[in-house]
Image: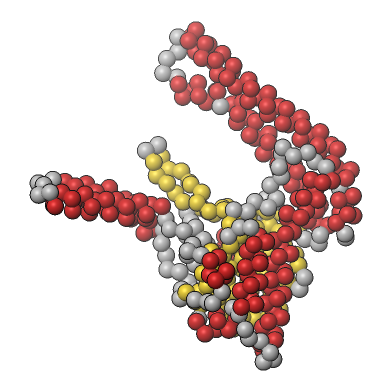
Amino acid sequence: MEREEILAALEAKLAPLEAQRKRELLLAGAFLLLTPFWAYLLLKAFQAMGARGLGSLWALLVAIPPGLTLWRLGVLRSTLKWELTKPLAEALGFTYLPALGLPQAEAEASGLLPRADRYEGEDLLEGRVGPFAFRSGDLALYRKVRTKNGTRYQRFFSGTLYRFALPFAFPQEIRLAPQGAGVRAGGASPALVLGFLAVFWGLLIAGLLFAEGEREGLPLVVGGFALLSLPFLLYGLSLWKPRAGPKERVVLESGAFERLFDAYGDQIEARKLLTPRVQEALVEFRQALGKPFWAAFRENEAWILVQGRNRFEPNLFRPLNQGTLATYLRAWTKDLEEARRFLEAMGLFLEAAKRGKGGG
């Protein structure tokens, strides 16, 4: 089905959904505007009753209007996904399940994800693009953080993971990562970084005291910074695990490629595959996405992890019309179209290389 036909088929849904969107935004604005008055009236009521020491109850009651607002807006987002995104995806020949995502075990099989204490997935999209079958999902990774008020989960990475089945095979596994970001997403643990900073500052201050002859305070400084750094170091190390797959960085000739990517794999095989033409295709792919990405190519699979994507989140402040739907449609299919072009180019190169026609 052509894009114009897809948009025309959904036109009948736009008017009622747009009316619902406006109504919910007006209610949200009213709730937020009334919150200060609601808080003032509650405070006066508590004072009139002579209630003291009920600050927590007052804060809980004050939070009711904003909480109700967020809940209603969340319902509106879910409605738009089911009423607009799902029909758009199905018209393109895809299967779209907003509430589901890639299973955690499948996502971790990519080898691109760091260790996380909690995994969340949504927006499962699967189908075919060109000759490639694919599965994809939005995901978020969380670390457990302990505070004086208890334990909470802090998100440290979000993105979209694509899994492509290929009609050709890679002779050796090759990984790509944004320049300087490491072979897996997420970067270094903040806790580990803080621990090493504490050790560094402790040693620096101890060195200054030693140079000034103030040796009496050395045990206190060294011991204090050691105790300060220990929880961070232990927590950071608990998040680390050996990285599977290639770790050896491959240095290539293209300056444009090297400014954007680090490549990992067998030195000889990686240079055979990542020819100047393939490097140029990867640079164009990165520029088209406009976001950093990690990739793993092995056997008959390609995994691509794009950072910071939330593909199907509707903009509640944008009117629902044909222009908005066309924009959504372009945004939702852009990654897949660019990946298809790149994978087709790489497949053609591999076939040519098998026939003895490949090379730089």
Q: What residue is drawn where x is 32% and y is 52%?
A: 197
Q: Residue farthest to the bottom? A: 356
Could you tell whether 30 is left or right of 222 in the image?
Answer: right
Query: Would you say residue 218 is visible in this rendering?
Result: no
Q: Is residue 187 or residue 13 the one in the foreground?
A: 187
Q: What residue is drawn where x is 57% and y is 19%?
A: 36
Query: Would you say residue 17 is visible in this rendering?
Result: yes
Q: Judge whether 27 appears above or below 347 on screen.
A: above
Q: Quadrant of residue 290?
A: bottom right
Q: Position of residue 230 (x, y in %)?
A: 28, 52
Q: Judge whether 68 appears above or below 90 on screen.
A: above
Q: Position of residue 356 (x, y in %)?
A: 67, 92
Q: Residue farthest to the top? A: 48
Q: Judge whether 295 appears above or below 82 on screen.
A: below
Q: Is residue 275 or residue 243 the one in the foreground?
A: 275
Could you tell whether 83 is left or right of 269 in the image?
Answer: right
Q: What residue is drawn where x is 18% and y is 53%?
A: 207
Q: According to the image, what is the colour scheme of the structure?
A: secondary structure
Location of the N terminus (image quadrant):
bottom right
Q: What residue is drawn where x is 59% and y is 16%?
A: 37
Location of the C terminus (image quadrant):
bottom right
Q: Is residue 98 or residue 30 the one in the foreground?
A: 30
Q: Position of residue 316 (x, y in %)?
A: 71, 39
Q: Position of residue 73 (x, y in %)?
A: 68, 36
Tag count: 0
Q: Residue farthest to the front? A: 255
